[in-house]
C-alpha cells in the first residue's frame, strides 16, 4: 500500500514551538516526515512580522501548518495571511493547513483567503484550548489558586491540543482531507468555573473561580503590566468568542480521525499527573 504523502516531502510548521505547533512537529517527526520549524529562533528563522524570512523558510517546502501569532483576530491578520499564502504558492507549496479560531469573523476572512488560494487546503477551526490553563495565559492563576475571569458562566467545549495536532497531521500527510473544514471541540461544554473545579479535583488542591467584569479583568491585566496588545486580544476574546456563540459541540475530531475527542477531565487528570500544576514548597 502506498500513500501519496512521501516522507521525503518537507513540511513547514509555523508556530513550531507553541501549544499546537510543537505537538504537530513531534508527531510528524515520529512518522518520518522532514520538518522545518517556523520560529524566530529556528535554524532558518521565520517571523510573521518580517516577510523577508518567509521565502527562505518556504524553500523546498511541500506543505505548511499555519499557526498565526498572536491570533487571526488581530488587526492586519488577513493581509498577512494573504501575503503568506501568495508567498507559499510562489515557492511551490502544495498544501496549506490553517489553524483557525471558532466564532471569530476575522478568522473566517483568513479561512476564505486560504480556501481561495488555488492550493490544496484544510481548515482546522478550534474552540478554546484546554491547554490555556497549563501552557498559556491562565497557568499562573491556577498555580496561585485563584482564577478570576469574565464570562465564567458561559459554557465552552474546550478542545485538547493533542486532538488539534492529530487532525492537523492527518491533514498534512494523509489523503482525504483536502477541501475539508474541521470544527474541533471537546465532547462536552463546561463553564470556566466548572473547568476550574475539574482542575482542583485532579490536583487535590483548593482552586477558586471568581467571576469578574471585563473592565476589572482589563484593569487587573494592566496592573500586572501585561502588554497592551495582549490585553486587547484577551478582552476581545472574552467579549466575542466567549459570549455563548461557541457553546455547542462539533464533530470535527470524529470526522477527521474517526474517534471521539479527549474530554476536559482527561486533560485535567493527565496534566495534574505530569506535575504542571504542582506548587513550589519554598
Image: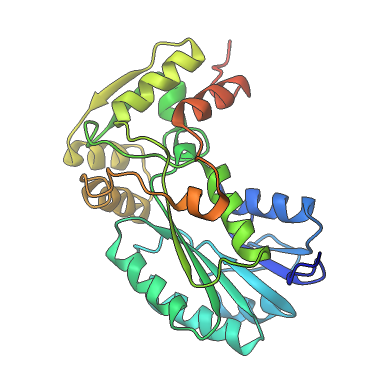
Q: Is residue 138 left or right of residue 232?
A: right
Is 246 left, or right, of 43 in this rendering? left
Q: Residue at x 51, y 36 (%)?
A: 262
Task: Write the residue at 23% across / 52% down.
Answer: 240
Q: Is residue 75 visible?
A: no
Residue 264: horizontal and vertical position, in percent? Answer: 45, 31
Q: Which residue is outermost to the bottom?
A: 90
Compare residues 261 and 196 and report the one nearer the observer: 261
Name the residue at 35% across, 37% down.
224
Side (left or right) of 70 relative to 90: left
Quarter holding residue 35: bottom right
- Which residue corresponds to the image point at 21% horizontal and 44% vertical from the top-left? 244
Q: Residue furthest front?
A: 1
| Quarter of the figure with the N terminus | bottom right
Q: Position of residue 219 (x, y in %)?
A: 23, 39
Whole-percent x, y for residue 216 in the image: 20, 36
Instruction: Count how many numbered circles sit on residues in the image.
Output: 0
Left or right? Give the position of 204 relative to 46.
left
For the C terminus, give its image quadrant.
top right
Q: Nearer the viewer, residue 74 or 29?
A: 29
Across and down, in percent, residue 245 comes to 23, 49
Amino acid at each position: 500500500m502506498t500513500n501519496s504523502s512521501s516522507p521525503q516531502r518537507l513540511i513547514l510548521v509555523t508556530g513550531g514551538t507553541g501549544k499546537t505547533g510543537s505537538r504537530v512537529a513531534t508527531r510528524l517527526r515520529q512518522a518520518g516526515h522532514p520538518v522545518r520549524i517556523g520560529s524566530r529562533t529556528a535554524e532558518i528563522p521565520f517571523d510573521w512580522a518580517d516577510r523577508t524570512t518567509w521565502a527562505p523558510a518556504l524553500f523546498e517546502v511541500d506543505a505548511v501548518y499555519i499557526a498565526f501569532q498572536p491570533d487571526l483576530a488581530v488587526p492586519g491578520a488577513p493581509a498577512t495571511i494573504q501575503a503568506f499564502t501568495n508567498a507559499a504558492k510562489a515557492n511551490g507549496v502544495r498544501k496549506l493547513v490553517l489553524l483557525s479560531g471558532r466564532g471569530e469573523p476575522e478568522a473566517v476572512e483568513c479561512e476564505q483567503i486560504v480556501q481561495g488560494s488555488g492550493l490544496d487546503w484544510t481548515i482546522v477551526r478550534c474552540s478554546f484550548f484546554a491547554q490555556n490553563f497549563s501552557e498559556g495565559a491562565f497557568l499562573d492563576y491556577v498555580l496561585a489558586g485563584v482564577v478570576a475571569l469574565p464570562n465564567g458562566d458561559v459554557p465552552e467545549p474546550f478542545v485538547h491540543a493533542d486532538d488539534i495536532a492529530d487532525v492537523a497531521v492527518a491533514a498534512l500527510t494523509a489523503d482525504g482531507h483536502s477541501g475539508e473544514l474541521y470544527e474541533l471541540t471537546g465532547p462536552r461544554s463546561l463553564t470556566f468555573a466548572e473547568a476550574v473545579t475539574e482542575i482542583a479535583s485532579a490536583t487535590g488542591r483548593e482552586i477558586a473561580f471568581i467571576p469578574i467584569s471585563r473592565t476589572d479583568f482589563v484593569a487587573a491585566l494592566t496592573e500586572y503590566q501585561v502588554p497592551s496588545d495582549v490585553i486587547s486580544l484577551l478582552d476581545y476574546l472574552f467579549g466575542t468568542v466567549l459570549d455563548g456563540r461557541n457553546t455547542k459541540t462539533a464533530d470535527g475530531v470524529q470526522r477527521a480521525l474517526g474517534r471521539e475527542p479527549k474530554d476536559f477531565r482527561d486533560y485535567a487528570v493527565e496534566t495534574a499527573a505530569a506535575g504542571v500544576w504542582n506548587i513550589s514548597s519554598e
